Amino acid sequence: MNLLVVGSGGREHSLIMKLHESERVDQIYAAPGNGGISNLATCVNINEMDMERLVEFAREKEIDLTIVGPEAPLLAGIADRFHEAGLAIFAPSQKAALLEGSKRYAKDFMQKYDIPTADYASFTKATDAKAYINKIGAPVVVKADGLAAGKGVVVANTIEEAVTAVDELTGDEDGSPVIVVEECLVGSELSLMAFVHDGNVFPMLPARDYKRAYDDDEGPNTGGMGAYAPVADVSSETLEKVKENILQVTADGIKQEGHPFTGILYAGLMMTADGPKVIEFNARFGDPETQVVLPLLQNDLLQVFLDVLDGKDPELEWEAKSCAGVVLASAGYPGPYEKGAPLPELTTDENSFVVHAGTRETADGIVSDGGRVLLAGAKADTLPEAIQSAYDWLDQHIDSDAFFYRKDIARTATPSKLMN
């Protein structure tokens, strides 16, 4: 089969690494891909948002299945356009992807279908949002309604911080963008992704990621600075409840709304004293969770996609190991940063792997081309062994002020307090 993977980040590289193992795969194309993906797939210079060129390319190369990584093309309707063209794609429709694309829509949806989540209110005027914040007090969470690459969330410990966040997210005192203000949940975070099609839900292993930029969960929110899987402090009984009371209810609800969900449903959860509550939904593979979950999958990933689309149980099987990864980021991320910093030869051994995120191939080698540059990962029998191998790799390969990484990923079992 010929496959097309849309996207250019670490999630897409991880998908291609796994798809490359399948004996059923003939050719993999990536649009646009990155410096690491080019070693496993043919990268084509088509922007992920250029729907017409992607459709034209899929027809020209007789693509049997397209898999979409990033959220932006989902919200732009890439799945709808491919279906109109009679092309197979594993991705949710534009309306189904609103679960990620609009935080207000997602919160209203959860309220309607009695899915546990934080109390909230949404506003179209900054002054109204500030008045509400002054009324309920802090800590409180302020979110931009739309896509923000993991950085449109501010966990404010004081009213002053929350008011400043409103100004930053709206741009002016009475800005029109929608702002969602939420109760601040306390607990440890958990990410649970599932393959979904027409009401059928097949969960993957639970993972835990680290969103703050710096050690000890300090600094601004990012797209994720590291992750590990599975998560040992969450019982199988709890995971089953999450499947039935959150993932399945969501799949059934979105179908009832008239736009059944096909693709990856990601639930970002807070494990509170009152049980699991949804922080957010994503309508695609998580990043960096995908990079530590897929290496543990024993199934042929292409066959999983095909089984799910055919309404069959893919009978997911997982290695009885741990996988951990640490993100190497450009200095300054998630704020302004420079591109083009050279990377060393990224050799790995049987205990480690590297997933490229923001890299570019040049005549002189691989250079940085994004905020999150790569993920250093490893599998092992235990989590401490896995994360130590990842850090050993970084210590041996990275010695440049152009990059930084957190030193405490997976060092404790229960990170990420007050992080919704």
Image (cartoon, rainbow, N blue to C red):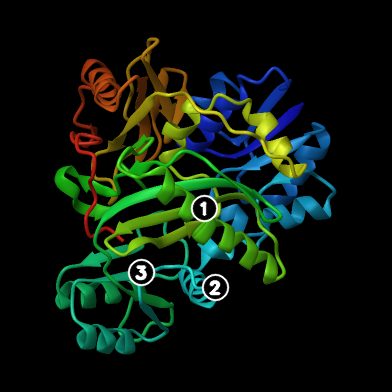
What residue did someone put label 3 on?
Answer: 143
- Gap in angstroms between the C-alphas marked 2 and 1: 15 Å
Q: Cα distance, mark 1 to mark 3?
A: 26 Å
Could you tell which of marks 1 and 3 lies nearer the N-terminus?
3
For residue 9, say whether it is visible. no
Q: Tell me the SS state at disc 2.
A: loop
Q: In this view, does 308 lie above or below 158?
A: above
Viewer-closest of 290 and 381? 381
Identify residue type, mark 1.
Lys
Q: Looking at this rendering, what residue extends furthest in the front direction?
A: 237
User: Which image quarter holds the N terminus?
Assistant: top right
- Quadrant holding the C terminus: bottom left
Residue 176: x, y in percent? 43, 82
Q: What residue type is labelled 2?
A: Tyr
Residue placed under numbered mark 1 in the picture: 243
**Going by the image, does 212 lie left or right of 229?**
left
The image shows residue 238 at horizontal and vertical percentages of: 41, 51
Q: Which of 207 and 396 is in front in this view?
A: 207
**Pointers 2 and 3 in contact (CB under 8 A)?**
no
Please name the residue shown 58% across and 20% down the image: 40
- Dot 2 or dot 1: first in sequence order is 2
Q: In which quarter of the image is residue 132?
A: bottom left
Q: What residue type is labelled 3?
A: Lys
Mark 2 and mark 3: Cα distance apart in space:
21 Å
Q: Which residue is drawn at 47% across and 61% down?
A: 147
For discs 1 and 3, the disc positioned in front in the rendered view: 1
Instruction: Tell whether 218 sits left or right of 27.
Output: left
Residue 219 versus residue 275 in the image, above or below? above
Can you tell which mark lies on residue 113? Answer: 2
